[in-house]
């Protein structure tokens, strides 16, 4: 039997490795990155030395929530901010694998089909999202969202932790 994966291990590893490279270049806190295929199965996970114990679960929840809702986690946060009951229901329905803050980014192929998601945890959520977007693009794929939040990068670089 031959099975086709929506996201190859090579592409997932490229995304994960590039995420960590961007994090080091930007002097970010230790990161954990999870890359899922379109079925929500983990293809690759990397965690830097010094990452907190819950970083894997948070990164997984960002990616899994994005796939489950069909929206990047920034949009989910913005959409659900005035709907806490629905947000709690989703968290329960997903067995806690739902983290509605930036850092969960959908991966699209060149036809616009969603083929997976990346979740990153370790630094500020906007900075996690920045790494995901640029790592996906470095792998030759498209990210949703395609760009990070306006002007966060310049502001965060002048206000490093």
Image: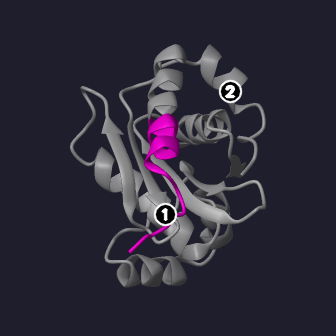
Question: In the displayed structure, would residue 46 be above or below residue 79?
Answer: above
Q: Position of residue 70 (x, y in %)?
A: 62, 72
In the rendered structure, find residue 154 and report the number of the disc placed on it. none
Q: Position of residue 147 (x, y in %)?
A: 75, 42
- Residue 10 lies left or right of residue 94; in this view the side is right
Indicate which disc, 1 or 2, sits on the residue closer to the N terminus: 1
Q: Are marks 1 and 2 in contact (CB under 8 Å)?
A: no
Q: Is residue 23 magenta?
A: no
- Residue 13 lies left or right of residue 128; in this view the side is left
Q: Quadrant of residue 2?
A: bottom left
C-alpha span from label 1 to label 2: 34 Å
The residue indicated by pointer 2 is 153
Residues 127 and 142: in front is 142
How many residues crowd mark 1 within 10 Å: few (<14), some (14–19), many (20+)?
few
Residue depicted at 68% across the width and 39% down the height = 140
The residue indicated by pointer 1 is 5
Q: Quadrant of residue 13?
A: top left
Residue depicted at 39% across the width and 54% down the height = 43
Q: Look at the image and tell me in which quarter the N terminus lies.
A: bottom left
Question: In the displayed structure, would residue 116 be above or below residue 10?
Answer: below
How many residues crowd mark 2 within 10 Å: few (<14), some (14–19), many (20+)?
some
Residues 42 and 87: in front is 42
Residues 105 and 122: in front is 105
**Chain part drawn in magenta:** 1-16
Q: Position of residue 91 (x, y in %)?
A: 41, 76
- Residue 53 lies left or right of residue 149; in this view the side is left
Q: Quadrant of residue 88?
A: bottom left
Residue depicted at 57% across the width and 41% down the height = 132
């Amino acid at each position: 039997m031959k099975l086709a994966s929506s996201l190859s291990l090579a592409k997932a590893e490229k995304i994960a490795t590039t995420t960590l490279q961007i994090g080091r270049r930007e002097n970010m806190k230790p990161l954990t990155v999870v890359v899922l295929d379109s079925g929500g199965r983990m293809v690759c996970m990397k965690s830097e030395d010094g990452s907190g114990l819950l970083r894997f679960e948070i990164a997984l929840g960002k990616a899994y929530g994005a796939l489950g809702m069909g929206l990047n986690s920034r949009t989910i946060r913005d959409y659900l901010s005035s709907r806490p009951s629905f947000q709690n229901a989703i968290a329960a329905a997903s067995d806690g694998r739902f983290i509605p803050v930036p850092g969960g980014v959908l991966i699209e192929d060149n036809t616009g089909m969603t083929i997976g998601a990346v979740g990153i945890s370790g630094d500020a959520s906007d900075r996690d999202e920045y790494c995901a977007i640029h790592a996906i693009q470095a792998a030759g794929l498209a990210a949703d969202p395609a760009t990070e939040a306006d002007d966060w990068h310049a502001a965060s670089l002048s206000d490093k932790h």
